[in-house]
Image: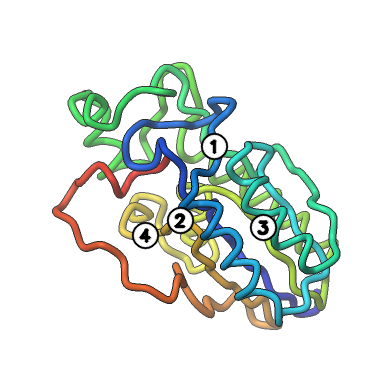
Amino acid sequence: MSGMNLLLIRHAANDWLGQRLAGWTPGVHLNDEGRSQAAALAQRLGGIPLMAIYSSPLERTLETARPIAERQGLAVQVRQNLGEAHYGEWTGRSLEELQKEALWPLVQRYPGGARFPGGESLPEVQTRVVAELEAIREAHQGQTVAVVSHSDPIKMAVAHYVGLPLDLFQRLIISPASVTALAFQRFGPRLVCLNHTEVLPAFGSEGEARNWEA
């Protein structure tokens, strides 16, 4: 397979961010900050000739992808398997409340053994997301492609491609509207940049809820 470049983009900010676990909740849209982030992101990527842009089907990812696609003259291609983890009974609950659940420390420290009640296991999420990215890679040899998804799926994909065990994927941080770039070359993938936002992240205390997905 010839080389290609994959830009993994997390959706921009929304009102659930750092407050509640949105998951597949419908109707979670970008807020004013998120729309500004998406517009700025499209401008930042304007000089990169993308051949395709793919997105999770959720509103907050589509609303992040569309300004990029419009600037590049592309249509957004929706893929279900790029969607957020299916959090089951955790969906829609506050992060403050979830931190009191017995499962929370397992998700943080032994995610390879964690399954969300009524939802996916974390290994299942990683498997489906990586399988979708591999299909995209196969279809775009020698090209640069953008994929707009969510924090946990992006972190799990990065862990897979750099050889990081799934149980350590929580050590990665993926911020809203950030770009993580992977270059696939003859002898394997290379991480070109991680969580690129042009600004430093907020440095919070260990286990702080706002580092979690929404």
- First in sequence, mark 3 or 2: give its number: 3
Residue 192: horizontal and vertical position, in percent? 53, 80
Cα distance between the residues tagged 4 and 2: 10 Å
Cα distance between the residues tagged 4 and 3: 17 Å
Q: Give 66 or 151, whichever is nearer the viewer.
A: 66
Q: Quadrant of residue 67?
A: bottom right
Q: On screen, 24 above or below 79?
A: above
Crowding around mark 1 (Cα neighbors within 10 Å: few <14, some 14 to 19, many 20+) is: some
Whether residue 157 appears in this view of the structure is no
The residue at which mark 1 appears reads as 124
Q: Dot 4: what SS?
A: loop
Which circle, 1 or 3, is nearer the viewer?
A: 3
Say which mark, if any, is on residue 104: none
Which residue does the image show at 46% across and 31% down from the upper left? 22
Say left or right for 13 vs 168. Answer: right
Q: Dot 1: what SS?
A: helix
The residue at which mark 3 appears reads as 147
Q: Give 55 or 200, whichever is nearer the viewer.
A: 200
**Kind of residue at badge 4:** Ile
The residue at which mark 2 appears reads as 176
Which circle, 3 or 2, is nearer the viewer?
A: 2
Q: Quadrant of residue 179?
A: bottom right
Which circle, 4 or 2, is nearer the viewer?
A: 2
Say left or right for 7 vs 114. Answer: right
**Kind of residue at badge 3:** Val
Which circle, 2 or 1, is nearer the viewer?
A: 2
**Kind of residue at badge 2:** Pro
Which residue does the image show at 63% across and 37% down from the upper left? 58
Residue 15: horizontal and vertical position, in percent? 42, 38
| Quadrant location of the N terminus in the rendered image | bottom right
Residue 96: horizontal and vertical position, in percent? 22, 30
Q: Dot 3: what SS?
A: strand
